Structures are given as C-alpha cells and as structure tokens.
Amino acid sequence: MTAPSAILLLAACIDPVEPFVVLSAGTDSDTAGPCGVAPQPPASPASAVSFEHTLLDEGQPQCLALEDLDRDGVLDLAWVSADAQEVVLAYGDGAGGFSEQSVSLSLGDAGAVYRCAVLDMHGDGDLDLVIGVGGALGALVSQGGRDFAWQATQFVFPAPQDQAWNVPAWIAPIDLDGEAPLDVMIGVQGLRDPGCTDDLVFESSETDRTATISDYEPGDILCALGDGDGGFNPAGDGHCPDPLVVDETPLPWTASLADLDGDGHTDVFLGNNFAANRLLVGTDDGLAPGPDSSGLDVYDHAMGSVLADFDGDGMRDLYVTDMGPDGLYTASDCHSFYGDGAASGLAELTRGTVTWGVVAEDFDRNGAVDLFVTASLEATPDAFTTVACDPSQAETPSAPSMLLLNDGTGGFSRVDFDPFPDPERMGFEPQAVVHGDLDDDGDVDLVVGTEAGVGVWWNTTETDGHYLGVAVLDDHGLPALGARIVLSQEGVDGDRVDEIRSGQGLSGPHAAVADFGLGVAAGDATLQIRWPDGTEELRGPFEVDQQVRVSP
C-alpha cells in the first residue's frame, strides 16, 4: 500500500513563486452562469471502481476527524467512542499505517462525547479538536507537535428544557462576524427517547418511509463567536437569527455550508429530523431565512447532507440522507431547488435504507461528482416498521455502505461496500464518514465509523481520468476555511467550483482540500481563488494530475 502523505509536502510540484493576478472583489469570468460559475464540460462515462479495506479499531466512534493535526505534512485521524474517556490520535506514519496515542478527556459530569470539529481556536497556527459533550463544548488543545491537552467547558449551552438531551448533533466552523478566529454553529438535540410509543408513529409504503412524533423537547441551533483565547461567547443579535429553526424540531441533525451565489457570504442548509428542513442565506447583516422558493422546506428525517454540483451546470445541488428514500434537490437557481430523487434513480436505489454520513467526490475521476453514503440497515416495506421499533428483533442484515456513481448524464448506479468484518446487527446508530487522499495517489479515500469500528476504504480504482487537488492555505499554513475555487482548463469550455470546508453534517471534519475530477480533459488549469476576506486572485496555470497548494 502506498504511504500516506500530506498536501503540505507537495510544494515541489509548483513553482516557488506562483503566477497570479489580483482581481477586484466579485470578479467573475465572462462566461459565468447565474451563480458565478460557467457550466462545466460533459463528463466521461463512469468507470469501474475498486477499494481495499483496513479495520483500525473496534467500537463505534461518535467523534471522527481527519486532518494534519501535528503539522508534519501527513494526514492524521482522531476518534472517540461514545462512552470513552479518551481520544485516540492516530498519526500517519508515512508508510501506509498509523501510530496511536491516547489522551484522557476527564469528562466528569459531561458523560459522553457526541461530535467534534477541527479549527485553530487561538490563532496560533495549530489545529485544535473541538469536542461536543453533554451540554457544552470542550477542546483538545494543541500545545505544538503531538502534544495535546484537554480543556473542558470552552462553551456552555443554555440550560435545557426538561428531559431534553441537550447534546450536539453537529459542530460547524463558520465565520459569523468577519473577524478571526473562526466561530461555530452547533445543532443541539432536544427530544427525549420515546421508544415505539403512541408518540412515535411509523408509516411505510412502497414509495416512502415516514415517522412522526407528537411529544418531544425541542432542539436548538446555537451560534458562538471565537474569543481569540481558546473559548467561545454566545453570538449577539444579527449573527444568529432567533429562532433559526422556524418550526421547532427535536433533532437538528445536519448542516451543510457553501457560498451558493458567489457573493462572499456563507449560506447554510439545516437538515432536521421529524421537522421541515431550512435554508439560511448569508447577507451583509448575517444569516437570514432563505426565500420561500427555496424548495427545501421539506419534512423528512435528515441525517446527513452535502452540497455539490452533481449535474455540472455551475450551481450547487443538495443531497440529504434519510430514513427511507434519500433526497436529491437540484438547483434551478442559486437559492432555489427542486426534488430530483426519482428522475435521477437515487430514490429507488435508497428506498429501503436508513442512511447517515455522506461524501460527494469524483471517486472514478470521470468529471462527475459521485456519492458515498453510510447506511445502518435496509428493509422491505413490510419489515420496516418492525425494524424501526426494534432492530434486534428483525430478520434484517446490516446494510452495506454504498457508492452511488454519477454517469454524467443525470443517472446514478449503486455499488455496495460490505459491512466491516463481523459487525453486530445495526439499527439506528449514526454512521460517520470522513475523506481525503491518504496515500497521495490522486484518489479520494474514505474513513468510516460504524458500530463495528473505525476502518479505512482505500481507493484503488484504475482510471484514465485526470484530477487536480488544491489546498488553499492561510498565513499560518492552515486550511483557509471558506475559500472558494473556480477551476477552468485550457481548451475546455466551462468551469468547476469547490470550497475549502471542514465536514458537512454527520460526515465530520475531513481533510480541507478541494479535489477536482477532470475526466479526459488534460489541459492546464487556472484557479480563480476568492479568499475568506473577499480578495480574489488568479493562480496558475498548473499541470493536471498533481496536488498543489496556494498560499497568500
């Protein structure tokens, strides 16, 4: 197996002084579409894919992260099991393996770990691991290199309502106030575990699966501003509209961030379980409710979500994992979407599943964005209600994770990944996934956390398709979260767009690199970079089939 390596070691792939042109804010190409990006060239036919699997650890993680935590140029992993009192830091060794180090968390009354995020909390150039526990955020704070120290109670949630869980479902780094350091949004679970009582009603048919709940404690969306000293303060008026969730929801399970219209402001999709989803639009005055025409105010059981341009028209589309058929919402404008799950075939491919974490990348390098989805169970309509109430009593095997290959013409095909060796029967436990190029071969690899443990799926697909990996770095050499990249190629009509983000929904914090699959197009690439402060530059041209870094 090829040794993992990191994006920061690849400076030799580019010129010491990168060619660039400074653009005025808001500059777009002459052929830009309505959201600032020209439709991309047609994709090549999908290729056969192959992956190899390695199991790293047993026990399901609630926190799963992939980044270069020790700043040595090699991607590292971090995970925490739900009831563990320590975090496992698995450092890439440069030879295809990992060396593990454990750090005690001393959770005390906080009880258990639920989710995590990776960001520089102090502005010191080191990455910290923000960890969500019961009612608060703690942090594994970098002391430099591989020295980390646990600091509890970096931010305390408001007092919960009676019986509410008050634990984080997701933590999303975001710039809310236009100032360093980064801030966070937090989806906080309410609910109370109703079991299969009269309060929780499941309905199942050949075309859909629906659950409703009549009595619950509401969840919340919290916004917290980084204080520059490693902590967070509640965001004031204008940064986080109150309430963000128009209809009360017990489980705000997922959030996906992107600048959908290219105006320099981050937009946010909020996916809710047992409630309607919501779109928030970034403005000069902060986040505001999306338009009535968004098409995303749909009741479902959103578990995970991802924004990506699946049809190549220059606008980001939305994929939402669900209990029952997953949802594909295709953009008709920057902030307007329509349901496209049936026409694409994705609804049929996921009809009987319970799906969770999702990744959108071009796994076969044909120039069209694919999907990898983790699943915990799959059942027929007759069995689904029984499975939902008590999975241990149903004759239903553990469901495979699945790769949904985009053929570039609006259709998808499903490739199943067998569950990890000897998994226990799965039910409704979250299945997380993070991704990055672990072995420096230009392909996107996957790290999956299920009830069976933490495992790596190494992408060994052989393809003639081309690619370009792009790391956009800040003054400290860390990922410039929120940066936007528009890629154009010599001799090719159309652009491709991606952003530097760290995880979406249940997918967890992943390697913050833009991976562009280019299909058969081999022309040199030019990058239009919009930095988080709004400055725009042209960088390149770059030869394809390499990974490059762009620094200020």
Image (cartoon, rainbow, N blue to C red):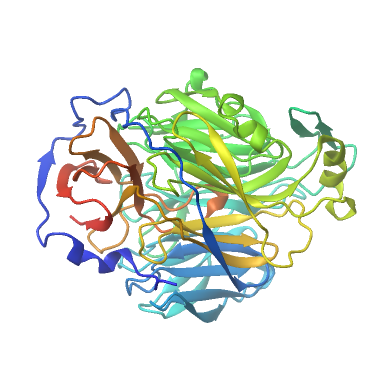
- Let me know if residue 240 appears in the view: no
The x and y percentages for residue 444 are 43, 56
Relative to residue 434, is residue 84 drawn left or right?
right
The x and y percentages for residue 434 are 51, 57
Residue sitting at x 45%, y 76%: 91
Relative to residue 117, is residue 144 drawn left or right?
left
Rendered position, 482 above or below 18: above
Rendered position, 257 above or below 315: below
Relative to residue 376, is residue 457 drawn left or right?
left
Residue sitting at x 69%, y 69%: 83
- Let me know if residue 60 appears in the view: yes
In the picture, residue 308 is in which quadrant?
top left
Residue sitting at x 41%, y 35%: 309
In the displayed image of the protein, which residue is found farthest to the top?
293
Residue sitting at x 11%, y 47%: 20
Quarter in which the C terminus is drawn: bottom left
Relative to residue 467, is residue 507 drawn left or right?
right
Quarter in which the N terminus is drawn: bottom left
The x and y percentages for residue 322 are 66, 39
| Count of numbered circles on the image | 0
